[in-house]
Image (spheres, coloured by chain):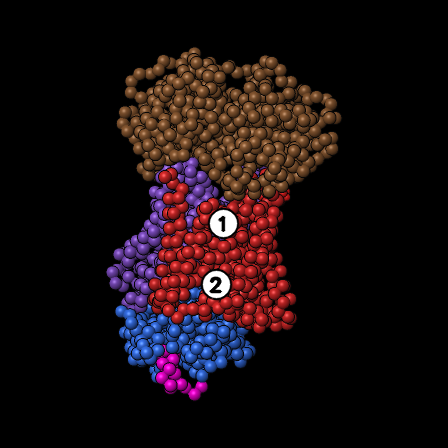
Amino acid sequence: ADAHGGYTIGVSNTVQGNGWREEMICAMRAQALVEPDVTGLIVAHRNTDSAGQLEDINNLIEAGVDAIVLNPSNPDALNSALEAAMAAGIVVVAVDAGVTAEGAYILSNNQEEYAYLGARWLFEQLGGEGDVVYMRGIAGVSADTDRDNGFRRALAEFPGIEVVHEVFTGWQQDQGKQQMFDFLATGIPFDGVWTSGIDNVIVDAFVESGAPLVPIVGADNAGFVQYLTTVEGLQGAAVTNPGSVGGAGIALAVDILNGEAPDSTTVLVDPVLWENTTDEGRATIMAAQNPNLDPEWPVSVSIPGWTDYTMEQIIACEGPGEG
Amino acid sequence: MSFVRKNAWTLGLIALFFVLLGVTRLIQPSFGVSGLESLARAALPFAFATAAMAVVVIVGGIDLSVASMMAVCSVTAAVLMQTMGGVPAILITLAVGALMGLINGVLIVVTRVPDIVVTLAMLFVWEGTALLILNSPGGAAAPFLREAIVGSVLIDGLPQALIVMAVIVALIWVPLKRSKLGLAIYATGSDENAAFRSGVAVGRTKAAAYAFCGLFSAFGGLSLLALTGIGEPVPGPYLLAAVAAVVLGGVTLGGGIGGLLGPIIAVFILRIIRTILTLAAVDPNVTTIVEGTIMVGVVMFGAFLMMRGRGPT
Amino acid sequence: MSDIHPQAETETRALVRLGRFLKDNPVIPLIGLLFLLIGALELMRPGIISPFWAGNTIKFAIPLAMLAACQVLTMLTGGIDLSAGIVATCAAFVAATLTPLIGPVPAMLTAMVVGAIVGLVNGFGVGIARVHPLIMTLGTGLIATGCLQVYQRYVIATGTDIPDILEWLGTGRTAGLPNGLFLFVPFAVFILWLMRYTGFGRLLFALGSNEKAAKLSGVRSWQVLMALYVLSGLIAALTGLLYLGMIRAPSLSLANPLMLPSVAAAVIGGTSIFGGRGSFAGAIVGALILRVIETMLTLARMPEGARIALFGLIILAVTALYVRFTEQR
Amino acid sequence: MTSHPDPLPASTADALLDARNVAKSFGAVRALTDASLTVRRGEVVALMGANGAGKSTFVKILTGAIRPDAGRVTIRGAEARVGSPAEARRSGLVPVYQEPSLIPDLDVSDNLRLGDTDAEAFRHWAAELGHPELRLDAMIRDLPLATLRIIDLARALASTPDVLLLDELTAALPTDLVERVLRVARAQADDGRGVIYISHRFAEIAELCDRATVLRDGRSVGDVEITEGVEDRVVEMMLGTRIDLGKRAAETARPRPEGRPRLRVQNLAAAPKLTDASFELHPGEVLGVVALEGQGQDELFEVLAGFRKPAGGTIEIDGAPARFRHPADAIAAGLSFVPGNRAEALFRERSVRENIAMPFSARARTWGPLRLRHEKTRVAEAVERLQIDTRAQGEVQRLSGGNQQKVTIGRWLAHGVKTLLLFDPTRGIDVRTKRQIYPLVRELAEQGAAILYFTSELGEVPLACDRAVVIFNGRVVDLVEATEATEERLMRAAYGLGTAEGAA
Ligand SMILES: Nc1ncnc2c1ncn2[C@@H]1O[C@H](COP(=O)(O)OP(=O)(O)OP(=O)(O)O)[C@@H](O)[C@H]1O
Ligand SMILES: Nc1ncnc2c1ncn2[C@@H]1O[C@H](COP(=O)(O)OP(=O)(O)OP(=O)(O)O)[C@@H](O)[C@H]1O
Ligand SMILES: [Mg+2]
Ligand SMILES: [Mg+2]
């Protein structure tokens, strides 16, 4: 790689067409652009399964990259390719979720904590008593399973809370909204909603159907964060789940390539909860929100201490050697 | 001469594949044995999904539940392999696959609901079944299964995954195609009414073709397990890819024409295009555009050739 | 036959006539099945059937039925439009992101142009280059997805806005019924009229039934296919605009989940993928049926796997029953 | 429900096949109400009836392709339930259906293998039927219709049937092959087997059959020995009334017209068969085309209809040169084409009305609202004029073969004709309809239309045409006036033995 005068980094991601993942990719590009040692970035970014991600990783190995930063579709499924990569001297960094391959670095949003934090806030908000709606992501996907563990942990701490509806939105806005309409139509009352990132449409469903709002927990997507300050009577909380973790992953990969590996191979980025029920919380939200940003993008576009790009750079979404 | 003409499309695809292989070498001179091996591995689930789809397309049907059946087989095998030996687990999985296919086929014949509706419904049924078997990724693969598709055999550059696939497909397809049943499958796909009048048990033939579809899907599920080492209940992107490869491979939607070789080569072409685009560091969004364009372009080109070949000279 | 009691004969006559009537109007048994399902839902969750529920069900069935129109029309000719969902998504995204830049009306018009362009490409591929519609529309769908992704990068920070008219159509209600009906009723009447009472509609059936015979009658099929796929693209774009108003979240995959159900609605409604046979009225009922089933399953408490599997089983049962009723193959 | 006489022979003891009181309804259409039939050893039985009488349905029931609603079938004296064509074959009943039942995407040998037919026996029969050089690796879809019929028959013969059922096999065959088929069928009977023979051509029936069972509206109405002069009786039984025999066109044929021809074809060539065709077709004239199978007549009609591009030569319409790139061009120039294979012309799942009205909407200009009233009257006129039986009009595929054929002609009647290209329009049409079609053709000509009329039945030429061109080996070799158009004369010319009069 040094022969080329810099590092080439490969990126692998398996979900396309979702604001969070798009932000992650843009953060990766922007960070690669500002890293002086990175001269090339190869991005394999498409909708596929673990077998497809294996294919992409193998292709990245063939392309001769120096490091691979990936958002793994599954912690266990990719080991064969990751081990081959490391055997070839390639640095492997998993972002957003972990992998079990020995020697791979993990820079992960703590998904279990993400769910736990939001659920606990919601249950506390209800005074430990009440019925909640639990709207999950895609059944059988690792991230959903991790979040479910966190949610259940919080649920175990609040015996007075009951889940009246549990449903999978498939992480699709339209399905989440439709499902909420169905719940509202049954006339069975409930006291709070926890959703796995499909959030602003849930608020819309309440407003459009004229039902009284209940506390809602979502993610720090630009649209929902804005609602937290603008929708009359909405009590809610956004839990950060920065897509910019991708940028941090690039930064980590470069550090390792430069011989500055961290002591532990696992770094967890812990989520933060922003709620709009206290003045302090509202102030945080006001500071974080960005009404011009694509509403599906998380507003936490950077992670202090990890990423170095500017707002303009991540929005430009250009990597090294482009534009 | 007649052989060339009869197989012109397949031969053209093979030529295209080798051209693309050359392009790959041009972009990445170091692309070699390991590249071929990973290409063959990546093609494995697609190839089986495509073979599965091809059989039912030839009989004049379509099976939208291929990817879901693969998911069921992958989790079934992954769960079984934790408690029993690899070989019995594989055999049970293959039986499960064939049974699922048979259920699809029998439902189509008995209910007289169009095949696209039945298999669309069964897509959900099998997807749900996979989730009921394993509600999150898990299980394990027997080590021999994982090793079966790694490395090369005989000579370097002849990927073991390719050989495994070729042997399985050939062992099932060649005898089938030669048999009365195979003939009946082609006849039914070509003209169901005429086949019935020629003495073919149309219903049984269809059901059998769907059972073979299920069997190939089971191999697809097993290859997913072999690749990843775990069972994943969520169906992968194999349905539309299989349909595309089947059509690219010269099988006519509507039935009666084509074989398995063309579609499987088409799978390799689609896979190597992805490799080339990655190696060339093409913007991933543009990659999608290029893939779509190539798919359409190849078929368009084929139609163009066909028109010229057929037109009066 | 003389041993049959005259009374019995008139009765069987009446039955036969009823059977024939149902066969000629297959949408009626389908509506019967819809009400059966609604009854089952009410049993499951007593009290759910209300004007509010009905309004919502209709509201969410509208975009599905509109997209199903793309499938019905193209399937009549033996085709299919797998790019419809993506076109709808593109149109919605383009409209939402352009509104702050160029104003709502030009933005919506641009969105419709996007649909027309994809349709034009599809029409060229299917009608002139003779590519199988499934491959052609799959390919243009991929191409459109890529273009949308590329476009998206230029509008990440320009903000989005949803034209008021779309919000009114998508979220408003008049007399308890969704405003979407103001768009959908004329749309449905137009499609039904197009299929039944125009030369163009007749040609769609003809092409699907026997393209050679159509040629023999002097039909230039490429013209028909070209117009058809452009129309399909326009319908998809219109659906995308309405859906944008309904969901109010311009996501990059907004209408994609409608794709498979739109095919399902069309085929449940009695449209044959092999062409020559189809009904938009059936597709509308099909869309409603799908929505009711979805509601049933959303409200059912069971593992997700069972829920998905049950969804498939109910679709199968409904169509099997329907086929039994009408004995059409 | 009046009782009808049972003219069937009382003794059925030596019957190979005996069917009694068979009934079958397709929804509202009662195809068969009470049909009976007996075939004994050594017998060729004609099954006769007008279009839509139920002959094909009867054959399908006897051979297990359709299940009857009622009835009893005995085979060699034993009660039989034939559930499928495969079972029928095992019991010795082998049909050749009205529509070819070969698999288009398989080659000949695979089609044989499908029914376990012995290839050697097949070859023998193919040779016997005039196709000694038939290649077993030829794709079915590449073969002409007449060859397919021969393959179907040879395949049936190769399985040594006890009862051979031939449903309008000869309708699509040229005259020379018809002779061979008749000879082979006779030989079957002479070997002690039975044959059921369906045809609308009395000449064939008279030559071949011993007995005729007549169906009318799905009911057996009689069983007669074939003797001299029985024709009129059979027709009466078939139709329930007497009909006039058509007046010979030869008696009314007009002298060779002068003036500018409507259609003038010069040195026309088209691959693969047509090499040099020249003739003129005038308004008011019915010009016959006579040729054996595969002499280039298919190409001639396809070029004129705009389906195929000519390799050479010129076409003039009303004195102006014409080039057709699409059938629409030919239609615009006033040339309407009725193909020989009705499957190519029909929208099977669509109604009679839509089938007939299709040309009204063909051009982009007419994509708008349908002119329903206009269409309805025009269609009704055509249906009336051709006497199309529209009981099963919801879908054209449910019409009987003959009525389907009429729909293909009716389309152009409704549209209005200037120049009509008829390719064997009476293929599979019953006597009554034929006798309606000849005057109709004459009438159209009298109204100023120009008609080019290919027929495989030489006897039709003097009935319908003013004169006929004979094509042999890709070129027009003779022009015969209707008054001289005896079958013998035409046949000689068609074999290339005609007087060296040359082309017109
Ligand atoms: N007339 C026919 N022409 C073509 N195919 C036919 C015909 N009749 C039946 N078939 C096909 O043959 C297969 C078996 O037919 P068969 O009639 O034995 O079915 P079946 O299930 O026993 O009928 P049923 O249940 O109505 O008594 C079916 O798939 C059907 O599509
Ligand atoms: N599948 C079907 N559905 C509905 N009606 C049918 C069907 N098949 C045949 N019929 C009807 O049954 C009647 C008898 O048809 P059939 O084909 O047996 O007549 P045919 O005597 O063979 O006539 P042709 O001489 O014209 O061949 C016709 O009225 C026809 O329309
Ligand atoms: Mg008949
Ligand atoms: Mg008939």
Residue A111 is inside the magenta segment? no
Residue nearer the viewer, C54 or D62:
D62
Q: Residue at x 36, y 81 (%)?
A: A254
Q: Is mark 2 on a helix, strand or loop?
A: helix
Q: Is residue C221 visible?
A: yes
Query: C120 left or right of A165?
Result: left
Q: Do the residues labelled 2 and 1 touch (CB within 8 Å)?
A: no
Question: Which span of residues is magenta-colored?
Answer: A247-264
In magenta stretch: residue A251: yes
Q: Give the main secondary structure, helix, strand or loop, of the magenta stretch.
A: helix
User: Which of the 4 image quadrants contains residue C91?
Assistant: bottom left
Q: Residues within 10 Å of mark 2 (few under 14, many from 20)?
A: many
Percent coordinates x, y for residue B36 in the rendering: 45, 66
Nearest to N terminus: mark 2 or mark 1: 2
Amino acid residing under circle 1: Gly
Question: Where does the image place residue C70, in percent across and percent down from the top left?
Answer: 41, 50
Q: Position of residue C112 (x, y in %)?
A: 31, 54
- Depth check, front residue: A196 or C202: C202
Q: Quick one: which residue is furthest to the top in this view?
A: D251
Q: Which mark is residue B302?
A: none
* Image colour assigned to chain A: blue
- Amino acid at the residue labelled 2: Ala
Chain B, hue in figure: red
Front position in the image: B165 or D52: B165
Please name the color used to draw chain D. Answer: brown
The residue at the point 58 percent across, 35 percent down is D123
The hue of chain C in the figure is purple
Tell me: residue D387, above or below residue C299: above
On the same chain: label 2 and label 1?
yes
Query: Quadrant holding ligand 1?
Result: top right
Which residue position holds label 1?
B258
Find disc 2 in the rendering and name its residue. B43
